């Protein structure tokens, strides 16, 4: 049986302001047909429409920080959800002040939304569990930016062990014992004989994980938490030539993003959040690949499947 | 000598929410190389970039009303102007509450803009002069919407009369008298003879004008003010089949827009602000053309020259 979907669709690759080719931050995430959005720069709803991503199915939106390129599209998206008659409640997770902004804005719009918004104020201590359902958890990642900023780690929960078809036949395993065995228990036969779990099961497929780290200066503090993730999206606002500018603005160079990826042994690194000053992004890619070979520049609208 | 530019570039043709083909409200206006923006729905800055309209040259922004599709793009645009190092002050004209929204938002952005914003609170009495320079005036148009809403009338000032080259020679008109003659005065020669103005001048080219009327229900109250304008942009959210819906939401049908255009003897009618429900807009155009033949559906990014 194929694994359920775990895919990330970046909607924007630019930073601060859009260019003719680059939209602002927003990642659409599908984990087992549950849909999430991280960040919502201006134009995010246009991108969702353009790439035919059904945004009414998004039930959880995470906002990393309150720089405009990460949330100025939120009100437009919320408003469109209202216009489309959404009635299911929507969860928004973000910095405490975002709640005030939303309240004030909707107050002036003079129209109540057709659905409830449940706002979850996020702290900035890092590594806090902020979302959980039966298949996935989301924890915050403490980033290092000019203003408080969270990254987000999506990690599947451990799956039950795989019950082997031949073991079912061999030991005549009754239906009611199967979940216990998948959970790791041994089986006692009516004869009194104990069959050890490892004779009946195989290891489950490993859990998949995705880390979103934007915006942030080079920060080794995140390495332990993102160790071994399948995909790390890490901002790469600048090239090495602008290392000073990166430091000054609490952003990273492509090389720094790759150093984090290499030290954390991530499988694939996706670079984004490029400064508008770069027309050609190949130098950023080259810089990163020299340090962490499995690196790509994000393509807006492309679904990266894990 | 050709007339200076007077052109209108609509940036969006949709209403309420964007579609794959339609952006939200925003009109870029060039009057004699002075640049204005009316309304600023989400994505307006993307459109300005896409159509290579240099938005740092906009010094005056007019916001009709506080529905999101008319102003949710404003903060992003203001923020980009800051990032591009704008230092010239920017004038914004809009409903009083817009000022509060801007103040609150910029407060949370925690970064002062590189330029000053001068906010002009607009009333809703209609026909108020809100902007004036040496070539053009802008007055509000009282529209009829669910919330207070202004349209805007751009009208060139009267030009001086044209001084005829042959008259200059014939009457040997000295340099210092010419502005008086252009202003309509007669000339007294040294002999005492009075040369009447009409022998020396021709009528100036008529003033050009543009009226922006969105969002509004059918409203004959605006006819007198927009009488004879060169271009009327009038919202046409619905077709005749949805007249009830238009009435309910204080919007207009294409036919109603054309009735206003016909009764006001406008030269050209531009329709926009189309409901997302219509994929094919030809029925709206047909409906309007049957009443006012010189009608077009706005094309986003096209400069309409007067």
Image (cartoon, coloured by chain):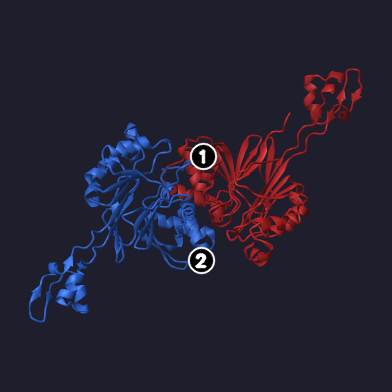
Chain colours: A blue, B red
Left or right, residue A7 beside residue B102:
left
How far is mark 2 from mark 1, CA to CA?
Answer: 39 Å
- Mark 2 is surrounded, within 10 Å at the Cα level, by few (under 14), some (14 to 19) or many (20 or more) other residues, namely few
Give the quarter of the image for residue A196: bottom left
Q: Position of residue B23 (x, y in %)?
A: 55, 51
Q: Quadrant location of the C terminus of chain B?
A: top right
Residue A287 rendering spot, x and y as whole percentages:
31, 36
Tell me residue B290's x, y (percent). 75, 56
Please tell me which residue is depicted at 50% across the width and 43% down the height of the picture: B78
In the rendered image, the vertical position of residue A80 relative to residue A42, given as above or below: below
Q: Residue furthest left?
A: A192
Residue A85 disc label:
2
Question: Among all residues in the image, which is located at the extreme bottom?
Answer: A190
- Tag 1 residue: B116
- Element type where label 1 sits in the image: loop
Q: Is residue B100 left or right of residue B287?
A: left
Question: For the residue labelled by badge 2, is the local secondary structure a helix, a strand or a loop?
Answer: loop
Choose between A32 and A153: the one closer to the eye: A32
Please indicate, yes or no, whether residue B256 appears anywhere in the rendered image.
no
The quadrant in which the N terminus of chain B is found is top right
User: Left or right of A15: which side holds B258?
Assistant: right
Give the x, y percent position of residue A25. Answer: 41, 48
| Chain identity of mark 2 | A
**Is residue A226 in sight in this rendering?**
yes
Q: Residue at x 63, y 34 (%)?
A: B33
Are the residues flagged by discs 2 and 1 from a single subunit? no
Looking at the rendered image, the disc whose residue lies closer to the viewer, 2 or 1, is 2
Q: Name the foreground residue: B219 vs B245.
A: B245
């Amino acid at each position: 049986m194929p694994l359920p979907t775990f895919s990330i669709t970046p909607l924007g690759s630019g930073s601060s302001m859009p260019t003719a080719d680059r939209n602002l931050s927003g990642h659409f995430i599908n984990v087992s047909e549950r849909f999430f959005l991280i960040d919502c720069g201006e134009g995010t709803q246009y991108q969702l429409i353009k790439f035919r991503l059904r945004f009414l199915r998004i039930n959880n939106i995470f906002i990393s920080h309150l720089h405009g390129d990460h949330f100025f599209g939120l009100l437009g998206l919320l408003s469109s959800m209202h216009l489309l008659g959404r009635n299911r409640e929507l969860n928004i997770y973000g910095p405490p002040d975002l709640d005030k902004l939303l309240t004030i804005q909707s107050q002036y719009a003079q129209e109540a939304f057709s659905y409830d918004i449940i706002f979850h104020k996020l702290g900035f201590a890092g590594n806090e569990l902020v979302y959980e359902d039966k298949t996935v958890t989301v924890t915050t990642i403490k980033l290092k930016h000019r203003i408080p900023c969270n990254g987000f780690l999506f990690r599947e929960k451990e799956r039950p062990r795989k019950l082997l078809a031949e073991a079912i036949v061999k030991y005549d395993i009754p239906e009611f014992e199967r979940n216990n065995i998948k959970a790791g228990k041994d089986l006692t036969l009516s004869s009194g004989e104990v069959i050890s779990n490892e004779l009946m099961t195989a290891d489950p497929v490993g859990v998949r994980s995705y880390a979103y780290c934007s915006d942030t200066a080079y920060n080794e503090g995140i390495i332990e938490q993102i160790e071994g993730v399948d995909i790390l999206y890490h901002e790469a606002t600048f090239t090495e030539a602008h290392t000073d500018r990166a430091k000054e603005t609490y952003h990273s160079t492509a090389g720094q993003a790759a150093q984090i990826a290499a030290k954390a042994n991530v499988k694939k690194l996706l670079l984004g959040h490029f400064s508008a000053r770069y027309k050609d992004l190949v130098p950023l890619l080259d810089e990163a690949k020299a340090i962490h070979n499995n690196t790509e520049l994000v393509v807006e609208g492309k679904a990266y499947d894990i």
